Amino acid sequence: MLDSTYWNNRYLSNETGWDIGHASPAIIEFFADKDKDAKILIPGCGNAYEGEVLHRQGFKNITLADFAEETKTNFLNRYEHFEPNQFHVGDFFELNGTFDYIVEQTFFCALAPSLREKYVFKMKELLHVEGKLVGLMFDAPMHIDHPPFGGSKEDYLALFGDHFGAVRIEKCQNSIPPRAGKELWIEIGHS
């Protein structure tokens, strides 16, 4: 597993090709009509642009999580209105709690494929009974020896379908231009 030193070094050296520099339109659009009291987790949040935009829009129960300490430093330097104790630095698999929404945005593809089933079980544990895992996953083969690790709709249906009662995966209609046609929108829940 790539450790926190690896990810910190990527941020310190600005080797963050996955970072689009702003919030993903698809994710922000999804939350436009959602309850502002919803508990939201954004794992592998990186520079947390989605967290910042959602917080500015009135969502206050947001937990950000990343393996790299540098992400928290970057975020809090950029956006001072966020409670530092709501930004968890450490191993995602050690997180506790339950959430109404968990936002997927380039976290899954950063995990080694050997951790995918563990990811599914952790999502199942962290999601409130009526909660949803929402966001974007790549619909393309990528690297086999380092992130980003790709996948396909069929891969994701097989992985999540055995563990969740409601799995909706479709082509994303409002991807950023460089990712157009290469992203899937997901909404996954217990039922």
Image: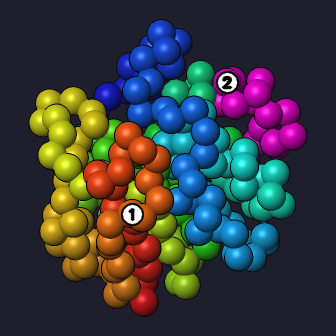
Disc 2 crowd, CA 10 A, few/some/many (<14, 14-19, 20+): some
Q: Is residue 30 above or below residue 119?
A: below
Q: Which residue does the numbered mark 2 point to in the structure image?
A: 74
Residue at image position (29%, 51%) is 182
Q: Amino acid at mark 1?
A: Cys
Residue 26 covered by magenta stretch: no
Residues at discs 2 and 1 in contact (Cβ within 8 Å): no
Identify the residue shown where x is 79% and y is 34%: 79
**Image x and y of residue 37, in percent:** 78, 71
Does residue 157 lie above or below 6 as drawn? Answer: below
Whole-percent x, y for residue 20 in the image: 51, 35
Task: Tell me where the magenta segment starts and ends, as one range.
Answer: 72-86
Q: Residue at x 67, y 24 (%)?
A: 74
Q: How is the image coloured?
A: rainbow
Is residue 181 found left or right of 12 in the rendered image?
A: left
Q: Residue furthest front?
A: 177
| Residue 125 in the image, given as x and y percentages of width and height | 45, 69
Give the distance between the C-alpha atoms of the residues marked 2 and 1, in whole angstroms.
29 Å
Magenta residues, dominant SS class: helix
User: Residue at the location (24% across, 55% down)?
Assistant: 139
Quarter assignment of residue 179: top left
* Residue 112 higher or lower than 70, as above or below: below
Task: Specify few, some or many for label 1: CA neighbours under 10 Å numbering under 14, 14-19, or 20 or more.
Answer: many
Instruction: Identify whether 169 is placed above or below 40.
Output: below
Can residue 170 be seen here? The reply is: yes
Q: Quadrant of the N terminus?
A: top left
| Residue under pointer 1 | 172
Outermost residue toward the top in this view? 13
Magenta region includes residue 85: yes
Secondary structure at badge 1 equals loop
